[in-house]
Amino acid sequence: MSFTRTLRAVSGAAVVGALLFGTAPVALADQMRDQQWALNSLHAEEAWKVSTGKGVTVAVIDSGVNGDAPDLKGNVLPGKNFSSGDPADQETKNDHGTSMASLIAGHGHGPGNSDGVMGLAPDAKILPVKHSDSQEDTYGTSYADSLRYAVDHGAKVVNMSIGGVGSPTEEEKSAIAYAAKHDVLLVASSGNNGSDNPSYPAAAPGVLAVGAVDRHQKVWDDSNYGSYVMLTAPGVEIRSAAASKPYRYASGTSDSTAYVSAAAALLRSKFPDLTAGQIANRLVKTAKAPAGTDTPDPYYGYGVIDPYKALTADIPAGSKNGPLKSPEAGDDGLMKPSNTSDATEPRDTSNIRAVFGIIGFSLIVLFVIVGITVLVVVKKKRKNGPPPGGPTGFGGPGGPGLPPQQGMYQQPGAYQQQPGGQGPYPPAPPGR
């Protein structure tokens, strides 16, 4: 196969405005608030009073990140380049990766950090993992090594604003399973074709797939849909930082994915003991779909994220895997996919069956020997006459004219195998 292409970006105009940011960001000036409408829609100011993502590393598998961008300086780690061109943290050619990073961990700049773009998790760190040097060279490029690197270098959330048609390779499946095994939450974009064709890695088991909505919380026309879509977030007319120009203006599920990754970073900072699946569970349980929408919906998933509510609502932790269909990794690192999140790897019972077989055969032989012995004894007794003492003699109740007493051994009942397995994962209801 392979698969991937970076989701298309729309370059745009500069962003100006004011933003105050201290230990926790405070109110935005009206102009910047209007241009970064997503922050208002996501109740960012309220969320920042609870968590700013401090202590959490978010890997951005993309075209690289410009760590010198004013709104990101100090929040970008060195990372690694798995492609060509600029180092992962010194991107100058493309805008896509820098844009995603700024939506996640932008902190503004200038006096009091009052200018520029603010991300939803401004105290998170970005681990740039350069997957491609341009949009064209992503075709046929595997993300397997990039993902494993992100897991091995401390990422608790991985943003994958990349995607394309075609199932993952075995190496990519193995990498996804590796991330799940190490409790790393993978967030990926559903795609920008406005179709129901599954996009990968978003549609792979173990990945949280994200669609895009506009400022009215209506699904974007070009947002891909299907049963694999789990959440939606702002992704239309989004302002963000860029590498080759000051700022970017774009629409796409790439942007909405970055916001979900940032929300996950807020939660992982606030709830460090929760698993990746339990973090996804909080996002799902607090998401909001339009009135009258049955969830999960193929367009909205479980709804539009609400980071503040996810941070503050009283929600039981739930199962380890939460709503994610979790892949399982064996000792060889290959994925053993399951239909449900709580499925476990079947045990090898061949040795147990062999032991039971030997025991059963031995019992049958023993029964035959005992049976022959009893018959010989009975015939001998009949030939020599009943034992002395009549019915209460050595022969017990089997006295003259009565059937012989049954032997003391009773054949045990067969072992009953308990029913196992679990039902299939429930399909999403059709329609919007």
Image (cartoon, rainbow, N blue to C red):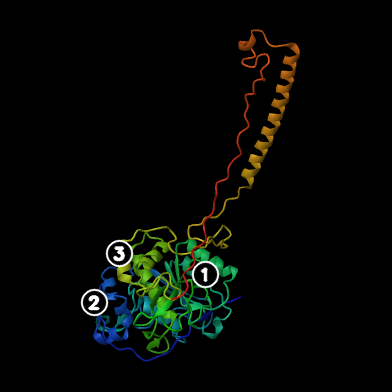
Check the image and name the residue furthest to the top: 389
- In terms of sequence position, does the residue under pointer 3 or pointer 1 come before the other? 1
Dot 2: what SS?
A: loop
- In terms of sequence position, does the residue under pointer 1 or pointer 2 come before the other? 2
Q: Is residue 373 above or below residue 5?
A: above
Q: Residues within 10 Å of mark 2 (few under 14, many from 20)?
A: some
* Tag in front: 1 or 2: 1
Q: Position of residue 199 (x, y in %)?
A: 52, 76
Dot 1: what SS?
A: loop
Question: Do residues under tags 2 and 3 come within 8 Å of each other at their CB atoms?
Answer: no
Q: Position of residue 224 (x, y in %)?
A: 48, 79
Dot 3: what SS?
A: loop
Residue 284 left/right relative to 145: left
Distance between mark 3 and mark 1 Cα atoms: 29 Å
Give the amino acid at mark 2.
Val
Which residue: 64% across, 23% down? Answer: 406
- In terms of sequence position, does the residue under pointer 2 or pointer 3 come before the other? 2
Distance between mark 2 and mark 3 Cα atoms: 22 Å
Residue 40 left/right relative to 102: left
Q: Is residue 319 above or below residue 431?
A: above
Q: Any mark on residue 204, and which?
A: 1
* Residue 419 can be seen, yes or no: yes
Question: Do residues under tags 3 and 1 come within 8 Å of each other at their CB atoms?
Answer: no
Distance between mark 1 and mark 2 Cα atoms: 38 Å
Which residue: 55% across, 83% down? Answer: 137
Q: Position of residue 380 (x, y in %)?
A: 74, 16
Residue at mark 2: 26
267 and 217: which one is in front?
217
